[in-house]
Image (spheres, rainbow, N blue to C red):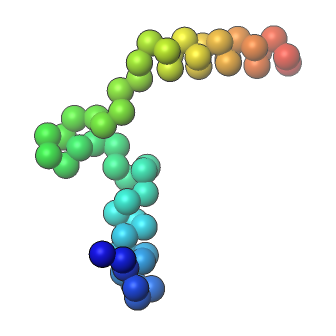
Amino acid sequence: HVPLSLEAQLESYILMVSTQNILSPSHGKPLSVPAQDMILGLHYKNITFKLSL
């Protein structure tokens, strides 16, 4: 199914944008949970950013 009208395209964009889909509609739990790799990567990135200032 492809939204053809402008209204349908706007509605599908609003419903499908990732910032709106943080919690699962079926069970209400977060869809994306940070893993250890993500946390360590963000920590490393912040350390290198602070050192470059």
> Residue 26: horizontal and vertical position, in percent?
14, 46
- 43 left or right of 47? left
- 38 left or right of 12? right
Which residue occupies the foreground of this view, 50 or 45? 45
> Residue 42: horizontal and vertical position, in percent?
59, 19
Residue extending furthest toward the left? 27
Residue extending furthest toward the front? 1
Please say if 53 is above or below 18. Answer: above
Residue located 38% across and 53% down the image: 20
The N terminus: image quadrant: bottom left
- 3 left or right of 27? right
> How many numbered markers are drawn?
0
Residue located 18% across and 40% down the image: 28
> Residue 21: horizontal and vertical position, in percent?
34, 49
Residue located 76% across and 19% down the image: 49
Please say if 24 is above or below 45. Answer: below
